[in-house]
Image (tube, rainbow, N blue to C red):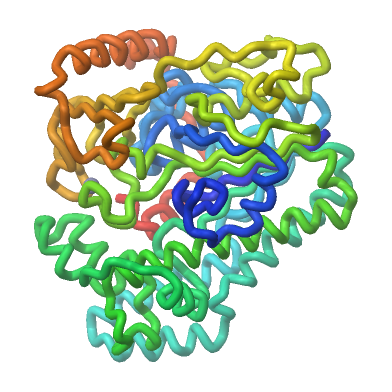
Amino acid sequence: MNILVVVVDALRVDRVGSYGGRSVTPTIDELAADGTIFENAYSTTNATDPALTSLQTGQYPRTHGVLNHGSHVSEMEKKRVEDTSTLPSVLNKRGFATGAFGRPLGRWHRRGFDRYPELTSAHWRLKSLEKAVSDILYSVHPSIGDVISGVYNSLTDRTGSDDENEIVEAFDSFLEDADRFYSLVHLMDTHTPYDVDENLVERYLERFEYENTPLTEIAERFPTGSITYNSLQPGGVVNQNNDQWRGHEVGIGTALARAQYDAAATEADRKIDSLLSVLRDRGMLEETLVLIVADHGESLGEHDIYFEHHGLYEATVRVPLIVRPPFDAVDRVSELVNITDIAPTVLDVLDDSKGSPTEFDADGRSLLPLLEGSDSDDTWDSREAILLEEANTQRFRGIRTQNWKYLRAVGDPACRYCERPHGAAEQLYDLTTDPNETENLVEDRSEQAAKLRAQLEELLSRYTHSENDPNASDNRRVEYDDEEEVLDRLESLGYR
Ligand SMILES: [Zn+2]
């Protein structure tokens, strides 16, 4: 059996048709019809580095050690994660060919992979050069920026198909000599800046209703010069370096940005279709366990978070999770699950003997009993709560139970990017009646809040890394050859 895990960065549940969302993801929906849809799946955090590490280790960030993202990851965090076993390492030792594709994040994520892509592909280098040049020229005069973008657009295919070809060709050649494989594909389409087929955006603007507020008007809600303020200016999060949108009646606003996000979801879906076609053509699809998941969601304006993943609200931490095993599985599961369950599930499905794999110390649990449903020999004990911890934006912690969400600020509740808080220092939401988390019940339901506060404390003490005292650790430094390159790239994506 083979394993293909596709991580669609920042993909929201409500953009996946099989979750009742807009039908902009036909391939994922088709796969879901053949597999299991996890309706209540969560990330462990709001940022890629800790989330992807949770996926690969089956552990919460505080267990595997990486709580932050990008340049905020400390020496201490790197040391902790060095000692953690990862799914690709375990499978590689078992004789699986292991390959990562797309835009992976290098450093410790690389561990256990036989094949890892160039971090800066030709396509990516050209794109970041174009963005850097046009950003500078826009600041001189917008029309010069347009000229440069026009030249770039005429030289390259804006639909992102060169990016797609690169991924698909690499995947195909990897399969050439793989008897059995574990593959992780990381797609960045739905992460800003959206680099999408503008004709598709145009079609979605006609097809769907989008609320439209100019981005510069929204920017005024944030302190001038804050990261968020800047990202909402021309040349920021939205792909505005394109003549088509200058003077277009839609204007540079939330409608355009959301239509670009939807188009980006479709482009990620097309890439998944191409990957599945490669497997089908090689006769390997039926013997492959396929998982589609996101590392975190994306806020498209909820809680005044625009095209970003700050906070621990549902828009940011709830993720699609679709599992298509090579056997008959139940259609839908409403149990609370999270991305720490993925690695134990893969190992359990592979293991002939059932039970928790001993070589892997996961916080998560195998989802196999849920996939098999009433046919399973094992039972799934419903999970009471999921621990959520925010990476380097405003540092909230919280829990999600079947019906409630409780959030608490670690220190200053102000978001580092927005330079203002997205909510009170303590928040309680009844998700059964208020799924959009608009009414903070922390005062009105103080008993419920106290219960969840205690439950959060219990989870925080249950999941603790053994090496938590910075003074007790040795002085070794963890160096990654690709760290500078990765951090440069993350900065170009807006991470500071
Ligand atoms: Zn924010």
Please name whichever residue, 40 or 362, is drawn nearer the observer in this view of the structure.
40
Q: Position of residue 318 (x, y in %)?
A: 42, 38
Taking the image as shown, residue 148 lies to the left or right of residue 3, namely left
Q: In the rendered image of this protein, does residue 315 appear above or below residue 147?
A: above
Please name whichever residue, 491 or 394, is drawn nearer the observer in this view of the structure.
394
Q: In the rendered image of this protein, does residue 363 appear above or below residue 141?
A: above
Q: Residue 97, can we see it?
A: no
Residue at 55% across, 32% down:
55
Q: Position of residue 446 (x, y in %)?
A: 14, 16
Q: Position of residue 439 (x, y in %)?
A: 17, 36
Q: In the rendered image of this protein, does residue 226 appear above or below residue 60?
A: below
Residue at 68% across, 59% down:
167
Q: Residue 369 appears in which quarter of the rendering?
A: top right
Please name whichever residue, 22 or 72, is drawn nearer the observer in this view of the structure.
22
Q: Position of residue 305 (x, y in %)?
A: 25, 51
Quarter of the rendering occupied by the N terminus: top right
Please name whichever residue, 158 or 205, is drawn nearer the observer in this view of the structure.
205
Residue at 75% across, 54% down:
276
Residue at 80% across, 32% down:
327
Taking the image as shown, residue 464 lies to the left or right of residue 267, namely left
Q: How many numbered markers are drawn?
A: 0
Q: Residue 9, can we see it?
A: yes
